[in-house]
Image (cartoon, rainbow, N blue to C red):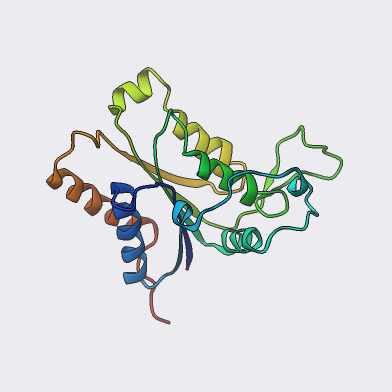
Amino acid sequence: MKISIILAHPNRGSLNHAIARRAAETLSANGHTTTMHDLYAEGFDAILPYAEFSREARLPREIERYCSEVAEADGIVIVHPNWWGQPPAILTGWIDRVLRPGVAYAFLEGDSGEGVPRGLLQAQSAVVLNTSNTESQREIGVFGDPLETIWRHCVFGLCGIRRVVRRTFSVVVTSSESQRRQWLEETAGIIDREFPREMAH
């Protein structure tokens, strides 16, 4: 399987980077082909220019590459921190520029954009791994877990991916080294379940 990993955290020594590496290692061990993009390290330009609005727009080569990879992916893994109940702006910009019409979704003929789109992504499942400094009960009870709505319903649900597995690791700021090691093991377990070892033909 082809699995696309998208990482959005500016600190290369972060838990997010460790989570993404463990996910990539597990996927590789299971025989999958992975592409991993560290958006900050790559200097991804998060600003969607008006010239890219049209489905027929001529895209920069690097954006075309992102679009091709996500369109061909059998699975997607997203790793990012919870910032104000949202993904970091650089990841929101990736959504804006890469999950575009004709790549991730399409409106039915005659629909000018006011209806519900038809999802185009072929990925069977998506895994979203978040870190947070908010306790889970407060995140759900007080804020309504906005990241759950964003990824499950507003992004992947509209792009045709029906299975979305999401896990938030918290509270990071007060976590011990042993707790973080446990989270990395849990990451490997989640990836292993969603993208198991490929059987030899």
Q: Residue furthest bottom?
A: 201
Q: Say above or below: 175 vs 66.
A: above
Question: Does residue 197 lie above or below 8 as drawn?
Answer: below
Q: Position of residue 51 (x, y in %)?
A: 77, 48
Q: Nearer the viewer, residue 181 or 174?
A: 174
Q: Residue furthest right?
A: 110
Q: Residue at x 46, y 45 (%)?
A: 164
Give the residue drawn at x 31%, y 71%.
29
- Asked whether the viewer can see residue 190, the reply is no
Give the left or right position of residue 101, taking residue 172 as reference. Answer: right
User: Considering depth in this image, is 125 or 137 the residue closer to the camera?
Assistant: 137
Residue that extends furthest to the top in the rendered view of this protein: 142
Residue 43: x percent and y percent? Answer: 51, 54
Quadrant for residue 118, please give it. Answer: top right
Marks counted in the figure total 0
Residue at x 36% of width, y 70% of height: 28
Q: Indicate the quadrant where residue 179 lies.
A: top left
Counting from the top left corner in percent of width and height, residue 73 is at 54, 62
Judge whether 114 appears above or below 90 on screen: above
Horizontally, residue 102 falls left or right of residue 27, namely right
Does residue 62 appear anywhere in the picture? yes
Which residue shows up at 68% across the image and 55% down it? 103
Q: Where residue 146 sits in the image (x, y, percent)? A: 46, 28
Q: Nearer the viewer, residue 134 or 47?
A: 47
**The C terminus - image quarter:** bottom left
